[in-house]
Amino acid sequence: MHRFIYFALVFVLATIYSVAAAPLAVARDVWVPHIEVPNADTVWTRGTTVTVEWATDDAPDNISNGAAIYLRKGNSTFLDPLATGFDLRAGQYPVELPDTLEPASDYVIVLFGDSGNWSDEFTINA
């Protein structure tokens, strides 16, 4: 009988310890900043450094994910991000446009943080 009580006590203590050691879920803030630049009137030139800008007036104190800026053309997203690891609360970030881009008017910037926010379509010239 003592053996049963001993094993039951060990089992209960192990269960309590494993529950106490479990990671706590951290609440994530979801924020969808509006991309202000580029917009439908924007014309950029390939091979230059440009600045992507977004609204920060409703930014949360804690942005739980990293940041990245991607370029899309039509239905395709370029695999390499234009920028990563910056502070989304800054509201802007400079990026260098590859000089190999095809001139077109169906480019879109995608700003990743808590979600993927898309700019309006804009133009990149040679």
Image (cartoon, rainbow, N blue to C red):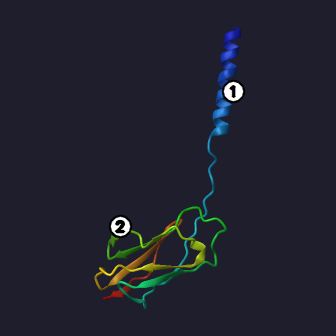
Q: Amino acid at mark 1?
A: Leu
**Residue type, mark 2 in image:** Leu
Which residue is labeled 2 in the image?
79
The local crowd at label 1, few if under 14, some if 14 to 19, many if 20 or more residues have their Cα within 10 Å, is few
Residue 16, position as x, y percentages in the image: 68, 32
Considering only order in the chain, which callout, 1 or 2, is on the residue closer to the N terminus?
1
- The image position of residue 14, as x and y in percent, is 65, 28
Q: Position of residue 115 (x, y in %)?
A: 50, 66
Closer mark to the observer between disc 2 and disc 1: 2
Question: Can you identify the residue that label 1 sits on?
Answer: 13
Residue at image x 64%, y 79%? 57
Number of marks present in the image shown: 2
Residue at the spot 30% in from the left edge and 88% down from the top edge = 126
Q: Residues within 10 Å of mark 2 (few under 14, many from 20)?
A: few
Residue 101 falls in image quadrant: bottom left
Up-down relation of residue 15 to residue 82 (above or below): above
Q: Is residue 7 left or right of residue 100?
A: right
Q: Describe the element under mark 1 as helix, strand or loop.
A: helix
Mark 2, secondary structure of its residue? loop
Quadrant containing the N terminus is top right
Query: Residue sitting at 32 percent across and 71 percent down?
Result: 76
27 lies above or below 1: below
Q: Residue furthest top?
A: 1
